[in-house]
Amino acid sequence: MPRVLANPSGSVDYSNLEYGVLMKFAYISGWKPAGTLEPVGWSDRTWPDGLPRPWRSMNYFSRLGQRVTDDDAAAMADALEAVVDDVPSHDALSHKVATIIDLPFRRRIRLIKPGVYASPFEFFSGENKPLLYRHIEFCRVGGYTIQ
């Protein structure tokens, strides 16, 4: 299931892989996550076992409607903007690709050769670089929910 991020500017969606690499890239580029706010209506939700579950603020990955604050989104944009010019405009990952799958409803999926590491700089190079610019612009609008 993709991650859909929504704020007053609209929504953007990322595959699980794109979102995970994006979060890692922001973090290794200097973003210090402030933590998410609980989804509207959460308030220590009780689960079937009868025990309350307090919100875990560092949860940026589930799709429960948690909210990223304006300041946190701006800090993420700052971190990514600081490195986006260092991301190659050419496809720096092409020599590591084993095969490409074209799906009608998603961007192309490039499968990396087994046992080969791809850095976030390589992942977002070439045709994926616009994803970084889009996310930076999206975060500049303000906070967002993760659905």
Image (cartoon, rainbow, N blue to C red):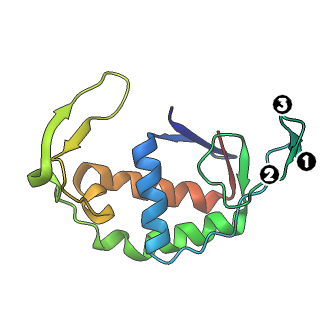
Q: Which mark is residue 43?
A: 1
List the single residue furthest toward the left: 95
* Residue sitting nearer the eye, 52 or 42: 52
Name the kind of residue labelled 1 in the image. Ser
Residue 128 spot, x, y in % from top left: 30, 50
Q: How many marks?
A: 3
Residue 41 visible in image: no
Compare marks 1 and 2 and give the one earlier in the sequence: 2
Q: Residue at x 12, y 42 (%)?
A: 98
Name the kind of residue labelled 3 in the image. Pro
Residue 74 spot, x, y in % from top left: 62, 68
Relative placement, left or right, of 22 versus 89 is right
Q: Which mark is residue 48?
A: 3
Relative placement, left or right, of 133 versus 91 is right
Q: Residues within 10 Å of mark 2 (few under 14, many from 20)?
A: many
In terms of image quadrants, where is residue 80? bottom left
Judge whether 46 appears above or below 70 on screen.
Answer: above
Compare marks 2 and 3 and give the one earlier in the sequence: 2
Residue 43 spot, x, y in % from top left: 91, 47
List the single residue furthest toward the top: 104
The C terminus sits in image quarter = top right
Mark 2 or 3, closer to the camera: 3
Judge whether 50 appears above or below 70 on screen.
Answer: above
Q: Which mark is residue 38?
A: 2
